Amino acid sequence: MIGKTYLLEIGTEELPPKAIESATKYFKDIVPEKFKSFFAVESPDNIEIYATPRRLAFVLKNLLEKEPDKEKIILGPPAKVAIDEEGKFTKAALAFASKNNLDIDQLEIIENEKGRYLGAKVKIEGKKLEEFLEEEIPNLIKNIPFPKTMKWNSTGFRFSRPIRWIVSLLDNKVIPFEIAGVKADKYTHLHRFMTKPVGRGEKKDIPEASSYEEITKLGFIVAKFEDRRKAIETQITGFASRLDATAILDQELLDEVTSLTEFPVGILGDFSPEYLVLPKEVIITVCKVHQRYFNFEKDGKLLPKFLAFSNTAVPDRSVVQKGYEKVLKARLEDALFFYEEDLKHNLEDFYPKLAGIQFHQKLGSMLDKVERNKNISLLLSKELGTDKEEDIKRANKLSKCDLLTEMVKEFDELQGIMGMHYALKQGEKEDVAKAIYEHYLPKTSDDELPETQIGTILALADKLDTLISFLSIGEKPKASADPFGLRRAAIGIIRILVEKGIDIDLKDFLKNIQKETKKEKILKFAEINKNWEVVFDEEIIPEVLDFIKARFIAYMKDKGFSTDIINSVLETGSFNFYRNYLKIKAIQEFKSSPEFNDVMTVFKRVGRIIPEDFTLEFDESFLKEKEEKELYQKYKEIEDVFNKDVENKEYQKALSELLKLKPYIDKFFDNVMVMVDDEKLKKNRLSLMKMIDSLFKKISDFTKITTL
């Protein structure tokens, strides 16, 4: 190891998981940038970040005692102003030197792209590491962003939880400062319950910053988040193997349990098989939300087992196990009661009661929302040519009814899931029942998509209504907040359209909704005083489309497509996102071909020669030169085939047809002057270019694509 090592540890009362996540991200983002000039070598080992419920820490390695000196160029007046005809410095030059505390012999002529200037090259001495740490570390601690902060003493300092100790150690030397009345020192505290005194943990001297991880490990602290996570995951899979089962490994729960422990110890427990009458999602949710337990399944069926994690290794785990089992039994008993009570009602009985749930004060009740969803879904059904209108109506009617069930009131994570299970229990068609669950999908950017056609239509309708509704009343998401989940709704729409291959133009469809709105008032929104008015008008369509388009761009970038290609396709004005995806994919594949750059040059030449707002006026009889006649004949030859390929979404074939024009376009530009004095001839040649360009733009505006 080269250079010095610095350790910062902030010891606290138990931090909530979100605070740990926020602080860890902050350290990862800020620390490398803040200390980059002090690292002797570039290495991923320069920074180690640690985070547990009781400590936030990082270790910096390979540090220089002083950051390197830098040279800075200070520019003054132009040389012709600073030096007179005799070669002497003018008053302007002397004033510049005085203002910047420069000696005359430091001045020199410096040339750049703007000309010759009087200036000086000044050496800036690097900061000393100790001074930098003493000055910057307190500021770094103060600026850690937390979801919530608190004050706990008279200093008024705010932090996620009270700070109890601070370690600030450069090799073996304390770098002094004070935060919230706590002075930095070299003492940490080990595991709260596995070292003495119990409750506080052993106070332990850290002789060297580099020994931090070893000392904490000996004190029953797995300080690195990633190591604890791996240890937990290993224990889960180990218990699964013992049970000859598969662990249900919820990543969110895994992160949470990692954030709640310093020394995770898995304890296997049982629950009565009588609770397996509950849908498995209910048991998993009870275990996750209330107890933070992991579950196991075998052959798709839940086992009456769970795995809990204690923060302490105890001699007799059976005592702890029984405690865990007792608490879970009470929770499952409640869930079973809710389930049995809910089954006493038909799901449909809850439908009129949706009028009592407010969707938004300006958008009416949840019943109004369901009615809007119905109308949009029926329009979608017609657009897609389905024959399942009655099933769509039925699934939509039941889609939000489980919001009034006791189970969903207790566990809102189960909305849709419980509706599906109750519908199946009450004899609804399987596709109708599944659609109740699927209409919420996808819930996240990487969540599963609806499988059934009914669920797909309802999911699109629900998300479109949400977007239209909230944007219509001016409720737009902010950069840091999206309380109504509009971005999530938009990415859900994109994923369904693209990944399910739904071939509709969203602009045309929104206009269709807007026409139906005027005719039947299907998208009416309630003001507070309950005077109904239609607010979805044509003006909101561009805003809705732009919002969805922005999510499409982000989605395509995440899939690895080039920004210029994405923009080139969107520039054509198409809002058929499935077709746009296929076009982008075809062009990206074409971009890897050897002839790409040559072909792009030709395509761009055609597009760029046409003036803006040019009106096409073509007359075949005006074709004079051999090359323009041949180009027109080739254009006519490929036009129908090209259009058929585009219609059939066979964009690779369509691009191949366009490639046939290249030699003819090359000959045209080599031998025919477009911008001639004869106005009619010029317009005719520009019209020929525009006709060809119109073909290109059925796929992409190729002028927007970057070539090498």
Image (cartoon, helix red, strand yellow):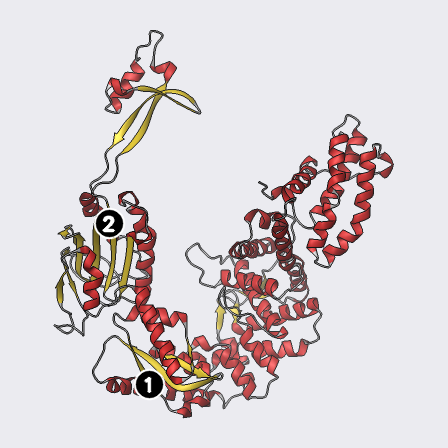
Q: Which residue is mark 1?
A: 269
Mark earlier in primary sequence (1, 2)? 2
From what the image shows, is residue 272 above or below residue 175? below
Mark 1 vs mark 2, CA separation in Å: 46 Å
Across the whole image, how many numbered discs are drawn on residues?
2
In front: 235, or 612? 235
Q: Which mark is residue 141?
A: none
- Quadrant position of the C terminus in the picture: top right
In front: 402, or 494? 494
Q: Is residue 674 visible?
A: no
* Residue 483 screen position, x and y as percent: 44, 62
- In the shown orientation, is residue 90 left or right of residue 670? left
Q: Mark 1 Cα within 10 Å, few/some/many (few <14, many 20+)?
A: some
Find the residue positioned furthest to the front: 1
From what the image shows, is residue 216 above or below residue 408? above
Check contact, mark 1 vs mark 2: CB within 8 A.
no
In front: 236, or 329? 236
Q: Mark 2 Cα within 10 Å, few/some/many (few <14, many 20+)?
A: few
* Residue 559 screen position, x and y as percent: 53, 57
Amino acid marked by disc 1: Gly
Q: Secondary structure at mark 1?
A: strand
Amino acid marked by disc 2: Asn
From what the image shows, is residue 665 above or below residue 379? above
Foreground mark, 1 or 2, reads 1
Residue 581, picture quadrant:
bottom right
From what the image shows, is residue 315 above or below residue 259? below
Q: Which residue is mark 2?
A: 139
Q: Secondary structure at mark 2?
A: helix
* Residue 441 screen position, x and y as percent: 53, 70
- In the shown orientation, is residue 673 left or right of residue 209? right
Q: Is residue 136 visible?
A: yes
